Each structure stands twice: as C-alpha cells, then as structure tokens.
Amino acid sequence: MTLRVGVLTGGGDAPGLNAAICGLGRRLLASGAELIGFEDGWRGAIEDRTRSLRDANFQHLLVYGGTLLGSSGDNPYKRAAESVPKVLATLQRHRLDALVAIGGEGTLGAADRLHREHQVPVVGVPKTIDNDLDATDFTFGFFSAVEVATRAMDDLRSTADSHGRIMVVECMGRHAGWITAYAGVAAGAEAILVPERPVHLEELCDKLQRLRATGARSAIVAVAEGARVFEGGNCLSSTEKDEFGEWKTGGTAQIIAQRLQALLSWDSRHLVLGHLQRAGKPIAFDRIFALRLGARAARLVLEKRFGYMAAMRAGEIVDVPLHAAVAARKVLGDQFLDRYETFFLPIGGP
Ligand code: F6P
C-alpha cells in the first residue's frame, strides 16, 4: 500500500523552509510515497486544509525564502479540548501513515505531545532563525538572518561616521541573543546586549565614553529585542506583550538610543531590523543544510522511527528524540560570552 505522509510548517517562517520541504518531498516521492501538505501550520491540520505535493512543486523551490505551505503560530494545544480531536480526525480522514512537523519550540512541542499522548507517528525538523532549539547545533535560517543583520551593521558604519552618531541596531531574539551575538561580533559592534547577560546602562555609557575619548566619532550597539538593560532598578526593555503573553517585536533599541542621547549628549539613532531577518532568499549554507534535514526526516519516516527529529551535531546530520529538542531552550552560554568578552559588558541587574 502506498505510504501517505503529511507535512506542515509552523511558527515564524525562516529562510530554508522550502528547501526542507524539497529535501523531504523528493526523497519520499522517489520511494513511491504520497505527500500531503497542510496549509498554515497546525491550523491547516485543525481545519483540514491540505494540498497534494508533486515533483513539479519542488522545482527551484529550495531557492526561495518563506514557505510554500504557509505558516501560523497556532498549534492544537492552544485550545487542546477542541483542537486536538480535530487534528486526530484530520489525520485519520487522510489515512496518514506519518506526519512531518517542521518548526520551532511551539510546533515541535505540539508534535511531541501528540506523539506521546496520542501515538501520532510524527517526525520533526527543527527551524528557527533564533537558533534557540536544544539538541541541534544550529537551526536553518539562523545564518541567513545573521547575514542580513551583519550587512545592515556594516552598511550603517558610513552614515554613522558621517554624522558622528551612535546607531543602536535591534536584532530578533526575545529569549536568546544568538543572532545579535553572531552579527555583532562579525560586524565588530562596539557593544552587544543580549537577554542572557543583563547589564547596567551605566556600563554601556562608560564603554562608549571611553571609546569617544580615544577619538571615535561613531559606534554601533547591537541589541537583541529581549536584552535586559537596567537603569537604576528599571529594566529598559520593551514590555509590550501579544495575545499569548509573548513579548512583541521591537522597542528595546529605541529606548536605549533615547537614553544614550540624553546621558551622553551623543547623537543616537535606532534601527529595528525586524522581519527583514526572516525575509529573502536563504544563503547557500541554509539551503543545503535544510535540504539535508528534510531528506533525513524522510528517512526517519521510511524507517518508521517516530518521535525523532533530524538535527545537526558536530557538523553531521543525526537523529535525536523530539522531546530532547523541546525540553529546554538553547541560550548563549558563558563559553561564548567569555570567548568574545570584549564585545559584551559586565553582568549587571536591577
Ligand atoms: O521566529 C522567532 C521570531 O523571529 C522572534 O525572534 C521574533 O520576536 C518573532 O519571531 C516575531 O514573530 P512574529 O512577528 O511573526 O510574531
């Protein structure tokens, strides 16, 4: 009997999603399986919105950013009592032998629970530009986002210098500062502020003042949207939340730029890179990386190894239990912060 496999992409999109679909689809179709895509992540599984995927869908697909299937932040456990039975019914209606969930913490967390609580035959593929998923060294989309942020900081140098300004550049990352740290180091930012290292505004001012005293006209400060910067007992980070209680993107850089201008009398501007970090074509590395993860997920399906996720460990593509990926968030460790200590500030708090 023909193997029938479902696939969905959930959560914030990341460059490389299409390449992952491509790696999965090509391998499965070549083995005679059928592939059914759910639209808009778990929402498509809840509402039973599908489309059949054929070889023609995969032509040039890996080149493009975004996701052919659409995505959403919804998942069945947000309204478990009504949505979980709907997902189970959809999977049964389509007589699916396996479901491949491509996503981050929320998407894979739901897949893991469906597997453990309802024996749904799931396989995971990790994605997030934030790179904060455990059990994999990197997630695809991360290095594409780092490239966008690095180029932006590089490009801002000339205008910052012309006008003698501080440019405070906000990168995505509410809970982990991976993009800010990698891009900040690569662009030689004068200071990097991340959620993992709470700091005092005073320390930032001192660092910039010292730099100015040596003759610097401008400075780049790289800030993660979830960075915690304290002035007195107040945290200056943006506190606006969305309907699910998650911090909303944007705001922290603006507050810091305003405070720097006021305290240092040094003209300061801010820039929120926002969704540009998720936009555009994936860099070549992410295309190939995502393609390999997709192909590995197909292998897991064909071998009927459910409850696993394809991952990268020490440069190799391996399988890890899905649960391990969602059990903890991967944040910047002391090793990273110490290695690049000149970019960061001493630890501070309220
Ligand atoms: O994918 C995660 C992320 O990129 C976060 O870094 C960011 O805060 C968030 O998505 C924004 O997502 P959206 O505006 O699509 O809800």
Image (cartoon, rainbow, N blue to C red):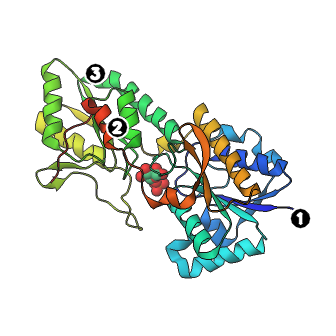
Image coords of residue 335 (percent x, y):
33, 38
* Sequence order check, earlier mark of 3 and 1: 1
Quadrant the C terminus occupies: bottom left
What residue is drawn where x is 24% and y is 28%? 165
Instruction: Examine the rendering and report whether any part of residue 72 can be seen.
Output: no
Nearer the observer: mark 3 or 2; the answer is 2
Of 53 and 334, nearer the camera is: 334
Of 254 and 325, nearer the camera is: 325
Outermost residue on the top side: it is 215
SS at badge 2:
helix
Q: Is residue 338 above or below residue 14?
A: above
The amino acid sitting under disc 2 is Phe
Report the number of numbered marks: 3
Q: Is residue 96 left or right of residue 244?
A: right
What residue is drawn where x is 65% and y is 77%? 86
The reply to whether discs 3 and 1 touch (Cβ–Cβ < 8 Å) is no
Decide if ligand 1 comes within 8 Å of the CB at mark 3: no
Residue, disc 3: 161
Residue, disc 1: 1
The amino acid sitting under disc 1 is Met
What residue is drawn where x is 25% and y is 27%? 219
Residue 158 disc label: none
* Sequence order check, earlier mark of 3 and 2: 3
Residue, disc 2: 336
